[in-house]
Image (cartoon, rainbow, N blue to C red):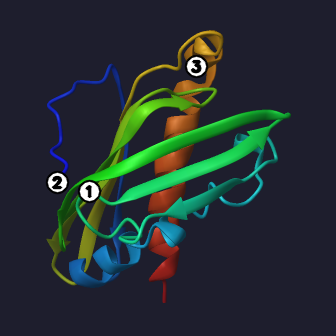
Amino acid sequence: MVNELPQTYRHHMSETVAVATTPTALFALLDDHDRLATHMMKPSAMMGWSAMNVTFDAGRGREHGSRISMRGRILGLEIEVDEVVTKREPPRLKTWTTRGTPRLWVIGAYRMGFEIKPDRTRSLLTIFIDYELPRWPFRPLGLIAGRFYARWCVRMMAQDAVKAFAI
């Protein structure tokens, strides 16, 4: 069993949106990391026109302690991150954190997750990331672009959830 350590991170970014569905339906959508990470699995400017490959353990990111791995290349350099689900409380909360030292360009170790609150006929969704800057030699790039990347990441996840339930 994995317990979430009371680690603090220096940087934080979050995005809150109203989603036209129930907390249960929204949690089911976001609990599927294939859907949650679609912004990472398709080429985009923020991904250096590259994409990440996502792999899962048997829990597929849907169980406490489940593992998720993402790997790819940007401009020929490998990037990779391993995550573990640290909290999962359907239908209101899920968090996951990096394991080991991620090989990323603009952010380092992080804790990410979402919280869902019922709001009449809809749900209020907050996606968040708490993160550190990457280690050298990418730390200067993290100082410049880390905040932009974190904002893009939480915004994409939030917007994808809104679109999934748009009428």
* Residue displayed at 85% across by 34% down: 76
Q: Tag on residue 1? A: 2
Distance Cα–Cα, label 3 vs label 1? 28 Å
User: Pointer 2 and pointer 1: residues touching (CB < 8 Å)?
Assistant: yes
* Amino acid residing under circle 3: Gly
Distance Cα–Cα, label 3 vs label 2? 32 Å
Q: Is residue 36 above or below residue 144?
A: below
Q: Is residue 123 above or below residue 2?
A: below
Pair 3/1: label in front: 1
Q: Nearer the viewer, residue 131 or 165?
A: 131
Q: Residue furthest right?
A: 76
Numbered disc 1: secondary structure:
loop
Pair 3/2: label in front: 2
Q: How would you rate the neighbour count of disc 2 (Cα within 10 Å): few for under 14, some for 14-19, many for 20 or more?
A: few
Q: Residue 132: horizontal and vertical position, in percent?
A: 41, 22
Q: Tag on residue 65? A: 1
Q: Residue 38: horizontal and vertical position, in percent?
A: 60, 64
* Residue displayed at 44% across by 83% down: 165
User: Pointer 3 and pointer 2: residues touching (CB < 8 Å)?
Assistant: no
Q: Residue 34: horizontal and vertical position, in percent?
A: 53, 70
* Residue displayed at 16% across by 54% down: 1
Mark with earlier residue (3, 2): 2
Please say whether residue 106 is visible from this viewpoint: yes
